[in-house]
Image (cartoon, rainbow, N blue to C red):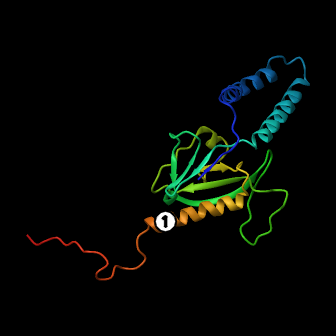
Amino acid sequence: MVLAAPTLPRGIRVLRMAGWAAFPFALALALFADLAYPWLAPVTVLLMVSLNAFYFTAMQGMGEQLTLTTDGFRLGAQRSAPTVRWVHVTDFMGAHIGPFRAIRMSEGGEWQDPKTVPNVIFYRLNRALVKPKKTLMHRLTGLMYFDGLIRNTFGVPTQQLMQAMRSCQRLALEAEGPPLRSPRPGDAATVTNPEP
């Protein structure tokens, strides 16, 4: 199953990366270029924080295509995007991330603030089985316990998407997991080493 999400055109994505690369230099230049104006530093900081908040709010509606398969899920439209296998995922958690705060999604039966509708799903991988690849952005945003996030811009409630992902994971674990009982005679042929 493929869930499409609104994305930025390639040219805008390149411009966005160039803007982020120029941001610290522009901030330093604005703060220290001309010290004769004492009001320049606070106005620059206020303007930069406002631009960041506007940017973050505008990017809330952007996401990546999510492909769910029987084996796992893939974020991104490219076939080369890495696939996360269901059997490697140990935890899912829904949350609401806004410009200035982040709140964990309540579990079933708990009260949910209607103003903080969950908009992302965090996932954690079994680090004994797979070494997660952390990008610089993951490290800068403090994504340490969880290994990735899925921004829900698919038009599906986050709770339903997370339940569907947990169901896929349960089915994959049942298909690959070892049997819960010892094999009975006749279930499978046993292999023994012949005596030399």
Is the residue marked by circle 1 packed among few (<14), some (14-19), or many (20+) residues within 10 Å? some
Q: How many marks?
A: 1
Q: Is residue 113 left or right of residue 16?
A: right
Residue at x 48%, y 68% (from the top left corner): 174
Q: What's the amino acid at mark 1?
A: Leu
Residue at x 76%, y 23% (from the top left corner): 26
Per the image, the residue denoted by label 1 is 173
Residue at x 73%, y 27% (from the top left corner): 23
Residue at x 70%, y 50% (from the top left corner): 154
Query: For the view shown, which residue lies furthest in the left direction?
Result: 196
Query: For the view shown, which residue lies furthest in the bottom direction?
Result: 185
In the picture, the quarter occupied by the C terminus is bottom left
- The secondary element bearing badge 1 is classed as helix
Q: Is residue 108 left or right of residue 34?
A: left
Q: Is residue 29 left or right of residue 82?
A: right
Residue 47 location (% of width, % of height): 86, 30
Q: Nearer the viewer, residue 150 or 77?
A: 77
Residue 123 location (% of width, % of height): 60, 55
Query: For the view shown, which residue lies furthest in the front direction?
Result: 1
Q: Quadrant of residue 117?
A: bottom right
